[in-house]
Image (tube, rainbow, N blue to C red):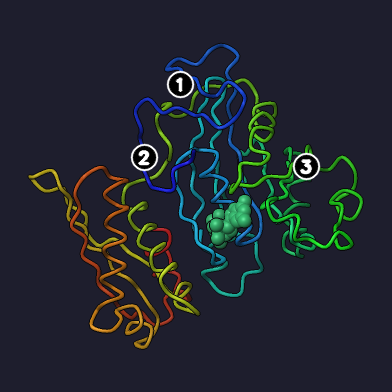
């Protein structure tokens, strides 16, 4: 069963055991001649379930997930290696109409990651009433690129809650026949459709090399992972505008002689009242954010960590391109 816990990014002897297919064999160090590989983009509106699906496919919690839309701000590459294929899964920010420099930067990050993609998994929630305008625009672009697009009807465990009279057909009601290379119902929660999805991904990748060592689960650095973990805890523990008004910057990360790490992270908010909320009564919320973050950071990094969190007001940081670059993409 998939662990809900973060694990180390690089796991020795990783075993992918997700389906009835023979993925339970540890990936080979030298790929066989019929090995397939490629870059697979996951796209869809905010909250569609992209990051949850990446975690499900990789078999470990590698990217952050919260019930709040716009959790993912940067595109990030995660690696799924089986005995017969390596799929580099590119998790992306949700497709939305940008109304601020931060949202523009998120959409830019999504568009940048569309280059060199071999396959697209486009997620639409089964409970949605069809793609929104921005999604139609993006899907049309993807179709023009002639890159295969698999439509995933995500959160399929919720399909019984959809009024049958409101069901729509993605081909006849919208895209036209043959536009999607495949349409699959999937649920990251129950595992429904995951074996079919894995074999569809493999079928749509060409013969190719192993881009990453078989035990590598992500293509990113420790600072990014730490920042994302702290951001996840803030998003989970706060409400209203706070999750979206918050940015996290790693100011310093040092390995100490005893094998542990000391990390200084700054939590950026936009107003003094947001700062007071994040700190909490007598510092209680900041303390909880710190405790929960440190627990996950230690699991990911595999060593003891001393985490110091500071909250700073940076007025309108989401509108300032330089700060955005440093905080979100630095
Ligand atoms: N019932 C159900 N809930 C799901 C499923 N997949 C994801 N969720 C929930 O949907 C919410 C959003 O999931 P994410 O994986 O963060 O969605 P996302 O598309 O990455 O969202 P953004 O990063 O904001 O674009 C979380 O509360 C998940 O637990 C699923 O298969 N079934
Ligand atoms: Mg996400």
The alpha-carbon separation of the residues under discs 2 and 3 comes to: 31 Å
Front-most of residues 270 and 286:
286
Instruction: Give the vertical position of 272 relative to 220 (above or below).
Output: below
**Quadrant of the rendered image holding ligand 2:** bottom right
254 on left or right of 65:
left
The quadrant where residue 201 appears: top right
Mark 1 surroundings: few (<14), some (14-19) or many (≥20) residues within 10 A: some
Mark closer to the chain start, 2 or 3? 2
| Residue bearing the label numbered 2 | 9
Q: Please report contact status of discs 2 and 1: CB closer than 8 Å, yes or no.
A: no
Task: Give me the residue at 50% from left, 16% from top.
Answer: 31
Mark closer to the chain start, 1 or 3? 1
Taking the view exactly as shown, the residue that stands out farthest to the bottom is 273
Q: Which mark is residue 183?
A: 3
Question: Label 2's element?
Answer: loop
Taking the view exactly as shown, the residue that stands out farthest to the top is 33
Is residue 59 among the parts visible in the rendering?
yes
Instruction: Give the vertical position of 147 relative to 230 (above or below).
Output: above
Q: Which mark is residue 26?
A: 1
Instruction: Give the vertical position of 114 relative to 96 (above or below).
Output: above
76 on left or right of 229:
right
The alpha-carbon separation of the residues under discs 1 and 3 comes to: 29 Å
Q: Please report contact status of discs 1 and 3: CB closer than 8 Å, yes or no.
A: no
Task: Point out the image quarter for the C terminus.
Answer: bottom left
294 on left or right of 196:
left
């Amino acid at each position: 069963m998939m662990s809900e816990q973060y694990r180390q990014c690089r796991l020795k002897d990783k075993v992918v055991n997700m389906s009835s297919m023979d993925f339970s064999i540890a990936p080979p160090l030298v790929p066989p001649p019929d090995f397939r590989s490629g870059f697979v983009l996951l796209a869809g509106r905010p909250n569609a379930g992209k990051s949850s699906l990446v975690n499900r496919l990789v078999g470990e919690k590698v990217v952050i997930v919260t019930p709040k839309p716009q959790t993912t701000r940067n595109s990030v590459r995660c690696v799924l290696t089986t005995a017969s294929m390596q799929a580099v899964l590119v998790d992306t920010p949700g497709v939305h109409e940008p109304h601020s420099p931060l949202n523009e930067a998120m959409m830019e990050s999504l568009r940048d990651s569309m280059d060199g993609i071999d396959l697209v998994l486009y997620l639409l929630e089964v409970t949605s009433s069809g793609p929104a305008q921005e999604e139609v625009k993006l899907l049309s672009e993807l179709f023009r690129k002639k890159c295969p697009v698999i439509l995933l009807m995500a959160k399929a465990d919720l399909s019984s809650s959809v009024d049958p009279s409101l069901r729509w057909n993605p081909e006849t009601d919208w895209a036209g026949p043959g536009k999607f290379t495949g349409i699959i119902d999937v649920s990251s929660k129950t595992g429904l459709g995951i074996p079919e999805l894995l074999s569809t991904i493999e079928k749509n990748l060409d013969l190719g090399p192993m881009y990453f060592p078989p035990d590598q689960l992500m293509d990113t650095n420790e600072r990014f992972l730490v920042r994302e973990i702290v951001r996840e805890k803030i998003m989970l523990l706060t409400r209203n505008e706070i999750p979206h008004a918050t940015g996290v910057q790693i100011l310093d990360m040092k390995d100490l002689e005893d094998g542990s790490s000391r990390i200084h992270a700054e939590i950026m908010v936009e107003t003094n009242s947001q700062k007071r909320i994040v700190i909490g009564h007598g510092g209680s919320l900041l303390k909880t954010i710190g405790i929960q973050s440190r627990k996950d950071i230690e699991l990911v990094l595999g060593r003891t960590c001393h985490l110091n969190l500071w909250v700073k007001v940076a007025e309108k940081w989401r509108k300032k391109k330089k700060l955005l670059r440093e905080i979100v993409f630095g």
